[in-house]
Image (spheres, helix red, strand yellow):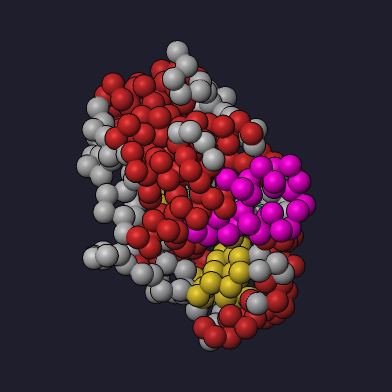
Amino acid sequence: MSVSFSYDALPGRVVFGAGAARHALPDQMDRLGARNILLLATEHERPMVEELAAPLGERVAGFFTGVRPHVPVDVAAAAVAAAKDIRADCVLAIGGGSTTGTAKAIALDLPLPIVVVPTTYAGSEMTPVWGLTDGEKKTTGRNPAVLPRVVVYDPELTLSLPPSLTATSGVNALAHCVEALWFPHIGPIPRLTAEEGVLALGRALPAVVRDGADVAARSDALYGAHLAGMAFAATGSGLHHKICHVLGGAFDLPHAEVHTAVLPHVVAFNEPAAVEASARIAAALGARTAAEGIAGLIDRIGASTSLAALGMQAPEVEHAVDLLMAKRYDENPRAVDETALRLILDGAYHGRRPGQG
Ligand code: NAD
């Protein structure tokens, strides 16, 4: 067999295991020589984060809890100021993708190592992708400076995720794998990663939604999310992610829920033009087609949602189509035009199953 491929293998240390967040942080901070740590979290996660950071003692020099969804630019500026105030030499982010995103915003400005302890399945911790929102415009980019140096995965921290967020955040991870699989020139290693991610998420999500306290199933789901983040990092944002970023930024809609509403429609649209990728997704989910597999899994885990239910207004669909028409979709397996965007957004807005009128 003749083999030829290229991709960026990203540096970074990963520690994964139940209880890891309680035991591994002091040692990881020693390895980085961190003495002045800025801790990041949401107010909601504050009690858990204070407990996890307690073994770091006085090395935690500041605590920023102003994290907001989609990293508004004023929040990014306040986080940078907090890091400067304490002369931080490391940023420790404990939380979901919004908390990781705030750490990345600091690293865009200041040359600080980031340590992330993820508590959702967003996967941002494995990527060099940053995102900032200014008004209704969300801008994303890639920069190696924002890639976390250490990621500590602890499935015990995900036990508190309610079933709805467990399901939608899991679909966010699934979307990374799906979009990686149809990315042009995906090499064999990211393909293996993405396929194993679909397999793990397809297996684990029904189990964790059924019993959120099942640590083994939580571990499996977090493993899938880790793979999904890696696959996304090795490929990039395609049609699906571009739609979700525009919707999240312009209409302030929740990220994981938007992914859940949009994914079945993008998969149904792309499937005829992404035959090999779709066959792999279908096989990993034990379904006849990728679209059936994704829609079926979303139904099974009770994550079905519509953009209307998330608060989007009907006239905003046309505004979203306009915003999306300004983007390029060169890497999408199927040509994207205004009719296609309207079809996808209309289906997601009403929360229809793809193919249903
Ligand atoms: P989030 O971080 O906004 O968290 C959603 C909610 O869940 C918050 O209210 C939070 O307090 C709560 N929460 C977090 N962990 C919890 C836990 N263990 N138990 C109970 N509640 C918990 O949402 P998210 O979906 O994790 O992340 C979305 C953000 O991440 C978006 O801004 C998205 O663009 C970004 N993202 C970036 C990348 C990337 O590669 N750059 C990848 C994926 C997502």
Count of labels shown? 0
**Taking 282 as reference, is 2 left or right?**
left
- Tell me, yes or no, if residue 333 can be seen here: yes
Residue 234, position as x, y percentages in the image:
36, 60
* Residue in front for this viewpoint, 97 or 42: 97
Furthest residue to the top?
357
Q: Locate the C terminus by quadrant.
A: top left
Residue in the image at 50% along x and 75% along y: 13
Residue in the image at 29% along x and 35% along y: 273
| Residue 17 is one of the magenta-drawn residues | no
- Tell me, yes or no, if residue 75 can be seen here: no
Residue in the image at 57% along x and 29% along y: 305
Q: Using the image, determine if residue 264 lies above or below residue 15.
A: above
Residue 41, position as x, y percentages in the image:
61, 59
| Residue 210 is one of the magenta-drawn residues | yes
Q: Which residues are magenta?
A: 202-228
Q: Using the image, determine if residue 100 lies above or below residue 259.
A: below
* Residue in front for this viewpoint, 335 or 248: 335
Residue 28, position as x, y percentages in the image:
58, 80
Give the overall secondary structure of the magenta segment: helix
* Residue in front for this viewpoint, 19 or 247: 19
In the figure, residue 1 lies in which quadrant? bottom left
Residue in the image at 44% along x and 54% along y: 194
Residue 36, position as x, y percentages in the image:
56, 79
**Taking 107 as reference, is 238 left or right?**
left
Q: Using the image, determine if residue 250 lies above or below residue 8.
A: above
